[in-house]
Amino acid sequence: MKMGQDIIRLIVASVILFGCMCGYMALMEGKNFSIWVLLTLWLAMLGVSIVFLVFKHAYRYALDADEQPIEAPKRQPQGVLKEAENISDSDKQALRESILEFAPEKVLRYIEKNIDLYSTNTFTLRSTDLYNIKKLSNYRFDAIVNFMPLNQIRGVNKLFTTVNDKLPDNGIWICCYEPQSVTKRNILNRFPVIIGWLYYIAFFCYKRVLPKMFMTSRLYFDITEGKNRVLSKAEVLGRLCYCGFEIIDERKKGDLNYVVARRKFRPEITVRRLYGILVKLNRVGKNGKLFKVYKFRTMHPYSEFLQSYIYERYSLQEGGKFNHDIRVTTLGRWMRKYWIDELPMLLNLIKGNMKLVGVRPISQHYYSLYSKQLQEQRTRHKPGLLPPFYADMPKTLDEIQESEIRYLTMCEQKGTLVTDFVYFWKIIYTIVFKRARSN
């Protein structure tokens, strides 16, 4: 509507301008001006202006520029308002029967294990309508359960932040979703192998790529209304952490994954996040300053909020990477194996915040795992594209630290230029002849 009004205003203004120009030509009769040249120029300028105007509104529409970020209301520590009581036996039986109409017995047992399902302070629903949660009184329930899969809900972050506001401190939120792996399995089992994979590739581009591209994301959700969306495990858990929840437990029950989360905090502001092919990651650089490292995306959306959870649950494997890292996509694993994801780091080399050989740039969380001595040594040097890791191939976190200490100590004793020259050829030898690959 607004774009149409702007185009009408532009056309009216252009017609008035064209009329003024024609009037000027009439007054300047005999100066050999061509009305056709003037008309062609006017139409060309009008066409370019309309195209620019359409692109401007399409860009604003794609970014949802008129939508304001979700700001958190001020809130003091708050417990549940009413003391819990048990519901009557008849209500308990009715609740069990209603749940078993759409969920198997094992789901019911799982819910019963994690919360007091039959308490007056527990609220259950199966709905895509956010209004059903918004209408709840604040802090009235200390547990909220929605049996509707998140795949059918548009505005997952809005749902999570609304639940966050309704729950008291340490309140429990239980939700469910169909993971991407189940969707993929169902598609491949439905068709012959070749047709199945071709269909899945097209389905993946439609359901996973278009919703994440900023010029098509909003259009996709306006057309589909957010129904039957594809969600990965990492994205759902990452969204929960981003929206102020702590993951207590998550289990696969049939085709659905159920997540039990505890309210820990309310983020000050929740904005729409865009996920393109290129990512910028905060890394600890020289003098302890944070800088942006450029990489190709290899992780699911919202994975950046799961680092602590992954470390606590799965710990580290050989080579210092996380064991069973659910955040990395299938394509991402292949890209990491051959360092394709690190090609954009050449921009960091050009900008001067990294050098060719040096300790790898790491996140603040990973940096906190290092010894105090190594932390101090690291901040005296720029990180590099080719880390000493590929010269020594250490397996444990302690061995990685020892490898970096040897490199940094050699830099301080023999000079950075000499050390980097020696390590460069060691790294090349390891990669070419020992077939070293990135995990």
Image: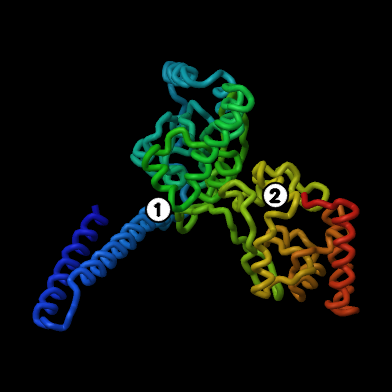
Q: Give left or right: position of 374 versus 168.
A: right
- Pick whichever of labels 1 and 2 is earlier in the sequence: 1
Q: Which residue is mark 2?
A: 335
The percent position of residue 184, horizontal first and vertical second, equals 59, 31
Query: Between residues 105 and 43, which one lies in front from this camera angle?
Result: 43
The residue positioned 44% from the left and 32% from the top of the image is: 123
Residue 257 visible (yes or no)? no
Say the numbered circle drawn on residue 62: 1
Depth check, front residue: 4 or 405: 4
How packed mark 1 is, by other alpha carbons closer than 10 Å (few <14, some 14-19, many 20 or more), is some
Residue 77 percent across, percent down from the top left: 48, 53
Given the image, on which type of amino acid does mark 1 rest? Answer: Ala
Q: Report how far apart the C-alphas of labels 1 and 2 lie in the structure.
A: 29 Å
Q: Image height check: is 96 above or below 125?
A: above
Query: Is 135 positioned to the left or the right of 250 in the image?
Result: left
Tag 2: amino acid: Met
The quadrant holding residue 383 is bottom right
Q: Report helix, strand or loop for mark 1.
A: helix
